[in-house]
Image (spheres, rainbow, N blue to C red):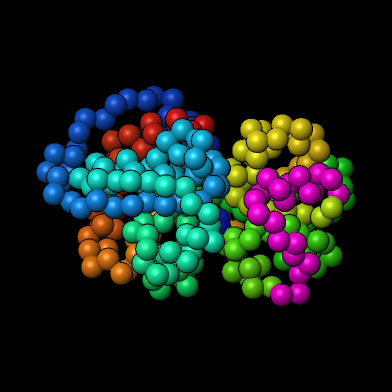
Amino acid sequence: MRGIMRISWLLAIIASVTVFAAPPSASDQTNTDRPAVQVVADEWPPFSGESLPGRGISVDVISTVLRRAGYTVEADIVPWARIMAGARSGEYDIVGSLFFDPEIDGYMAYSAPFYQTSVKFVRRSAAEHRVEGMEDLAAYSIAVGDGFLYEKRFDRASDLDKVVVGTTLQGIQMVAAGRVDLTLDSEEVIAHAIRVQDRSLQNRVEVLPFVLATHGVHMAVSRSRPDHPQIVADFNRVLGEMQADGSLNALLAKHR
């Protein structure tokens, strides 16, 4: 997305076996004059969601990094369509849970990625649907999220049988019920939907090994803010500090 872009999830968990509280960085102590910013993301668990710890991986990381950089942060979970409209108009300062997209880059300035994920397909268990490349997809009906961004060629393919759904969970449930052949999303989003949101899906669907795309997960700042270069620079600097001192891995461990 994004409306689907890191340190590998498994590597982050492994690296977090040794968790420690990092001492305050220089940025914690000196950048206290930064302005308030609003961070928004959509319901896209485990990356963002109202009921998730810290409102999800993305919101938690973005808010923590910016606070360490001296910013006052407010965070909200907002529907994806509203986020895109608000991002274009400059209504929102910062959008989280973003994959890099050239169009969005025209009005939002991207940070360095703080996570990395792979986009994969889901089929019904024991189905014979085979996907080893884009050329295999024409034979299948595919549930896609409304306005979600997966991979440029796939997103622009008008000859595919795409069935629009509201959420990844809805798409997986449709696959399990045989209403569509395939759906897709970030592998973490798929895993969360199956293991947490609807456990009845665990023996009814399976994730295919083919990777449609690998994306970094970013935040992006509205270019309508005159200080957007400073916000991005501050975020990237403190993110680098947290990667170096181990506190990013400790933060990610909360979301495993």
Expressed as whole percent of the image width and height from the top left, the position of residue 58 reads: 44, 45
With 222 as the anchor, is 43 left or right in this view?
right
- Can you say whether 106 is above or below 111 in the image? below
- Can you say whether 141 is above or below 124 in the image? below
Q: Quadrant of the N terminus?
A: bottom right
* Visible residue check, residue 40: yes
Expressed as whole percent of the image width and height from the top left, the position of residue 237 reads: 25, 51
Residue at (62%, 38%) from the top-left corner?
Answer: 192
214 and 218: which is toward the camera: 218
125 and 180: which is toward the camera: 180
Residue at (68%, 45%) from the top-left corner?
Answer: 169
- Can you say whether 19 is above or below 70 in the image? above
Residue at (34%, 59%) from the top-left corner?
Answer: 93
Expressed as whole percent of the image width and height from the top left, the position of residue 188 reads: 58, 43
- Is 164 within the magenta? yes
* Visible residue check, residue 217: no
With 38 as the anchor, is 159 left or right in this view?
right
Expressed as whole percent of the image width and height from the top left, the position of residue 101 reads: 49, 67
The boundaries of the magenta stretch are: 158-178
